[in-house]
């Protein structure tokens, strides 16, 4: 069962590049969630590493779009991204050092962050970037 499902109504920014990235992010989070509790630290670690790398790539993509087109709230948006990445990288280091586990609470934290971020924060850039030709 999926932890999170992307729908256009709930998560669509109407910037196709970023909507596709969000869908990939959701798929990767669901794949990590499916491995939690299997006891296979290698698989969990691989899924975790892939997700964190993709999150960083996606955040850079959004920030580039916003910066290139002069989005006024890019600095505040970037701060939100940096906070999540710092939390995830810290957990990643602890996991690989054997000091932490990835649990359903971990994947639920990421899901809740996405549910609180995309519809509230990301959707705000949609109309602006669409007005700049990014649909």
Image (cartoon, rainbow, N blue to C red):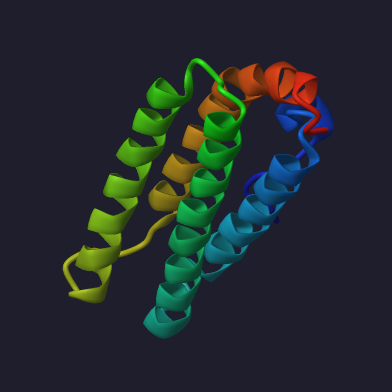
Query: Does residue 111 lie above or below 36 as drawn?
Result: above
**Which image quadrant for residue 102?**
bottom left
**Which image quadrant for residue 98?**
bottom left
| 86 left or right, relative to 43 | left
**Which residue is nearer to you in this view: 70 or 36?**
70
**Count of numbered badges drawn on the protein:** 0
Residue 113 image position (x, y, % from top left)? 47, 34
Q: Quadrant of the N terminus?
A: bottom right
Instruction: Name the residue at 49% across, 47% down.
Output: 60
Is there any visible trace of residue 35 in the rendered image?
A: yes
Instruction: Name the residue at 35% across, 47% down.
Output: 85
| 97 left or right, relative to 14 | left
Residue 76 image position (x, y, % from top left)? 39, 21
Query: Does residue 114 lie above or below 48 as drawn?
Result: above
**Which residue is nearer to you in this view: 68 or 97?**
68
Is there any visible trace of residue 5 in the rendered image?
A: no
Residue 38 image position (x, y, % from top left)? 48, 76
| 2 left or right, relative to 71 | right
Query: Does residue 35 lie above or below 12 as drawn?
Result: below
Q: Quadrant of the C terminus?
A: top right
Instruction: Name the residue at 41% across, 84% down.
Output: 42
| 28 left or right, relative to 40 | right
Instruction: Name the residue at 40% across, 75% down.
Output: 45
**Which image quadrant for residue 5?**
top right
Residue 35 image position (x, y, % from top left)? 53, 70
């Amino acid at each position: 069962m999926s932890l999170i499902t992307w729908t256009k109504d709930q998560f669509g920014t109407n910037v196709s590049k970023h909507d596709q990235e969000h869908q990939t992010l959701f798929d990767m989070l669901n794949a990590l969630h499916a491995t939690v509790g299997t006891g296979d630290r290698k698989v969990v670690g691989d899924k975790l590493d892939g997700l964190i790398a993709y999150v960083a790539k996606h955040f850079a993509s959004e920030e580039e779009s916003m910066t290139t087109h002069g989005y006024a709230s890019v600095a505040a948006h970037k701060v939100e991204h940096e906070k999540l990445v710092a939390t995830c990288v810290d957990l990643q280091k602890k996991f690989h050092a054997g000091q932490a586990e990835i649990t359903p609470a971990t994947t639920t934290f990421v899901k809740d962050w996405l549910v609180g971020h995309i519809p509230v924060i990301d959707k705000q850039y949609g109309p602006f970037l669409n007005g700049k030709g990014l649909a």
